[in-house]
Image: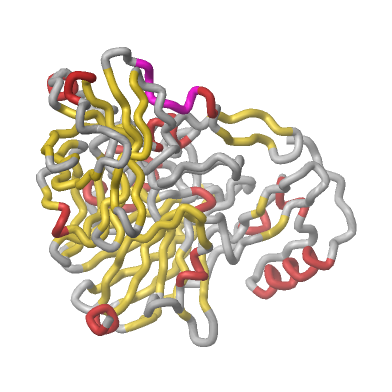
């Protein structure tokens, strides 16, 4: 990254510096944070607090050796008293804006979603693989992955197989994810193949101002060609549910055009016409009528530490599971206790960059947690928890976050309280409020 010429702080920068200093960070220049974030290497004081009945928050520093450390923020939820739900919105949101609405008293950054620096080209459904909200399955998985589910009103975390059934105009079909290593199923002419945003390939290119830019090549962001196949784009609307919105003989359907794409053999595609109603019936053996919400998760901490991450590929741009330190967000379910944890870090610091996959596993084990039953959520600059405080919403994690310039002449903007614009999150409400709605 090229060096930036330091200029006298502008009015917005001065206001940001004042907020940062109030939070204990000795920042002199906002623009310099684009190349040096060591000022965020501040150990938090240990704190334990009940933020609501059934919801406990803890903050503590953890030493990693040789002066290196991470700050650990943990939210523990008693599911007999509170309820967590996965939410998403294609337009995005800031985490702290969710708190205080619809009885939400806490929110945590969600699972892996599509991220690109091109605002004009985004997927219809930004969640990668499975997502269900308010009883509606919005996207189907292309690969088997762990998932958080609200099934029959109970929180469950487990492996969600990328297979199931659906109906089109009353005709039942089996389906399988396009990235599943199951040639026997995909070779069956009666089985549909699912493609989606998780099939895209995010590319990184150098940028003299921000260091790099992420985007997707529109021309190649399509299903692969196959003269024996017909691809149909399936889109969802609140009034009409899922229906076929376009048909593409021979493949070449846009991966971002709808919620997902179904591929069929030409001889079995007679019902797959524009306007045809699509009803998802089963996923991984589960009846979707019993699902209230759910979302695909990242790999378990154990799998990430061992490098067993084949289902996480180009759709993330660069792998977050390489053996290097970065901020991470975790989720775990232990009996009737659901907990979220942020292992914080600023990438452009020397002693506070976060943790590696191996260190994450070691910290889980040291805390009495089985790394095989703890899973990754979206980490890095997305790692954040927001909750109601005594007089205002409190936020922790990714306080170093800068909004990148939208033009060569625009400066960086500190947005640590808001953080990165998210496409998915977990919201937490009390069971009492949820039952009263």
Q: Is residue 5 a member of the stretch shown in magenta? A: no
Whether residue 341 is visible here, answered yes or no, is no
Quadrant for residue 184, please give it.
Answer: top left
Residue at 27%, 78% in the rendered image = 434
Q: Is residue 424 left or right of residue 142?
A: right
Viewer-side residue, 375 vs 238: 238
Where, quadrant-wise, is the C terminus in this rendering?
bottom left
Q: Please provide percent x and percent y for residue 240.
A: 31, 54
Q: Please provide percent x and percent y for residue 28.
A: 79, 61
Viewer-side residue, 272 vs 403: 272
Compared to 203, does 140 lie above or below? below
Q: Is residue 222 a member of the stretch shown in magenta? A: yes
Quadrant for residue 25, please give it.
Answer: bottom right
The magenta-colored residue range is 220-225
Quadrant for residue 50, please give it.
Answer: bottom left
Residue at 40%, 72% in the rendered image = 106
Q: Please provide percent x and percent y for residue 416.
A: 61, 62
Q: Residue furthest top?
A: 227
Viewer-side residue, 301 vs 175: 175
Compared to 363, does 140 lie above or below? above
Name the magenta segment's main secondary structure: loop
């Amino acid at each position: 990254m090229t060096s930036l010429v330091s200029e006298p702080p502008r009015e917005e920068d001065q206001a940001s510096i004042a907020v940062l200093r109030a939070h204990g960070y000795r920042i002199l220049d906002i623009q310099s944070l684009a190349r040096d974030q060591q000022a965020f290497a501040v150990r938090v004081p240990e704190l334990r607090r009940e933020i609501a009945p059934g919801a406990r928050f803890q903050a503590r520093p953890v030493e990693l050796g040789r002066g290196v450390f991470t700050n650990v923020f943990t939210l523990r939820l008693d599911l007999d008293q509170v309820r967590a739900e996965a939410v998403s919105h294609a337009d995005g949101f800031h985490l702290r804006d969710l708190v205080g609405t619809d009885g939400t008293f806490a929110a945590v950054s969600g699972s892996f979603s599509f991220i690109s620096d091109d605002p004009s080209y985004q997927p219809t459904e930004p969640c990668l693989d499975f997502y269900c909200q308010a009883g509606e399955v919005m996207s189907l998985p292309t690969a088997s992955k762990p998932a958080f589910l609200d099934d029959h009103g109970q929180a469950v975390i487990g492996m969600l197989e990328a297979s199931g059934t659906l109906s089109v105009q009353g005709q039942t079909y089996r389906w399988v994810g396009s990235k599943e290593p199951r040639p026997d199923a995909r070779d069956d002419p009666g089985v549909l193949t699912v493609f989606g945003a998780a099939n895209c390939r995010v590319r990184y290119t150098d940028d003299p101002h921000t260091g790099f830019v992420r985007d997707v090549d529109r021309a190649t962001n399509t299903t692969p060609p196959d003269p024996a196949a017909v691809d149909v784009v399936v889109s969802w609307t609140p009034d009409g549910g899922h229906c076929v919105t376009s048909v593409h003989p021979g493949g070449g359907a846009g991966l971002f055009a709808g919620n997902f794409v179904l591929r069929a053999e030409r001889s079995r595609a007679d019902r797959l016409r524009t306007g045809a109603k699509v009803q998802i019936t089963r996923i991984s053996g589960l009846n979707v009528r019993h699902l209230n919400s759910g979302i695909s998760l990242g790999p378990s901490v154990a799998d990430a530490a061992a490098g067993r991450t084949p289902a996480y590929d180009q759709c993330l741009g660069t792998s977050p599971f390489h053996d290097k330190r970065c901020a991470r967000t975790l989720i775990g379910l232990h009996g009737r206790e659901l907990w979220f944890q942020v292992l914080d870090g600023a990438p452009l610091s020397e002693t506070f960059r976060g943790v590696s996959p191996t260190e994450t596993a070691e910290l889980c084990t040291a805390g009495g947690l089985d790394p095989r039953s703890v899973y990754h959520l979206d980490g890095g600059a997305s790692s954040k928890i927001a909750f109601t405080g005594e007089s205002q919403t409190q936020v922790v994690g990714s306080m170093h976050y800068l909004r990148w310039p939208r033009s060569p002449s625009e400066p960086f903007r500190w947005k640590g309280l808001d953080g990165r614009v998210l496409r998915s999150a977990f919201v937490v409400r009390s069971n009492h409020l949820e039952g009263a709605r």
